[in-house]
Image (spheres, rainbow, N blue to C red):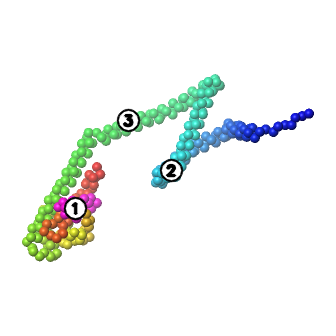
Amino acid sequence: MSQPVTPPAPAKLARRKKLSLWMRLSHLRRQRRVQNAITLGVVLLGPMLAFATFLVLGPLDQDVGGPGLRFVLLLDLVYVLVVAALVLQRVAQMIAARRAHSAGSRLHLRLTGVFALMALIPTVTVAIFAGITINMGLEAWFSQRVQRVVGNSLAAAQAYENEQRRDLQEDAQALANYLNARRGEVRFMRTASLGEVLRDGQLQIQRGLREAFVVDGTGEIKARGDRSYMFDFDPLAPIEIETARTDGILILKDWENNEFRAVVNLVGYLNECLYVSREVDGSILKLLDET
């Protein structure tokens, strides 16, 4: 009398299915076409990821913490791990074949060593040549002769700025003193008379002033000097006028318009200030600020 067949347990069925799936994947991986497809995919995926990383970090100007950048960097990390795993697997197979004394294992190792050496020789040569070239270039850039030339140029630019600043301060203060003295002579000075006095004093400055204005506490023009026009007037900020009143004189830089400006507080007036400018070489002084 035959005994009834006991059906396999669900756990055994699941284990058999898993083993069967793993065996099929392992068999599929050993096929030459699948290996070639995986190799080609890995080779093509590298430049694609590099280009995607360049786009995210460069022209697209993405935020550092943006999701796109994090996703691309995650793909790069996965790609590096996959390539490293494939290389380690291949090295492990070669070592195992060498220990098992399989046919062709020694030749395989020798060929691998030769190709690795052939790949390293140009890389090391280029690295050494680049290092020597960069070292020689840096030595040429930062040699004593170049440093001396740069130092002399910097000293000349600083001397030029100091000279222009000192001359502007002296001329602006001289014109302000002239206005203060004439203010004491004229008891009731009108705007037209103030403009005439300003032009007379401006013409007496030997080094010359490009523009000369008298402004009130709000920055409004009260009088204009010689060749001082409304369209050339650069308004003053209230903080600049207040600083000139507190310190007596304020020097302003305007390299874009090639000008050095000065604001001088006038003594004996209600709230007027003298506002003058001198033409300078803004390109030199701008480079001095950037140095």
Q: Residue at position x 72%, y 38% from top?
A: 15
Packing grade of label 2 (10 A; few <14, some 14-19, many >=20) is: some
Q: In the structure shown, which secondary structural element does the residue marked by tag 2 occupy?
A: helix
Q: Amino acid at mark 1?
A: Thr
Rendering quarter of residue 207: bottom left
Would residue 36 be found to the left or right of residue 207 on screen? right
Disc 1 target residue: 243
Looking at the rendered image, the disc whose residue lies closer to the viewer, 3 or 1, is: 1
Which numbered disc, 2 or 1, marks the residue that appears first in the sequence? 2
Disc 2 target residue: 69
Q: Which mark is residue 137?
A: none
Q: Quadrant of the N terminus?
A: top right
Q: Are marks 3 and 1 in contact (CB under 8 Å)?
A: no
Above or below residue 188? Residue 74 is: above
Looking at the rendered image, the disc whose residue lies closer to the viewer, 3 or 2, is: 2
Magenta span: helix, strand or loop, mainly?
helix
Q: Is residue 268 magenta?
A: no
Would residue 105 be found to the left or right of residue 226 on screen? right
Q: Is residue 51 visible?
A: no
Q: Is residue 250 magenta?
A: yes
Q: In the structure shown, which secondary structural element does the residue marked by tag 1 occupy?
A: helix
Q: Which mark is residue 132?
A: 3
Which span is picked out in magenta? 240-257
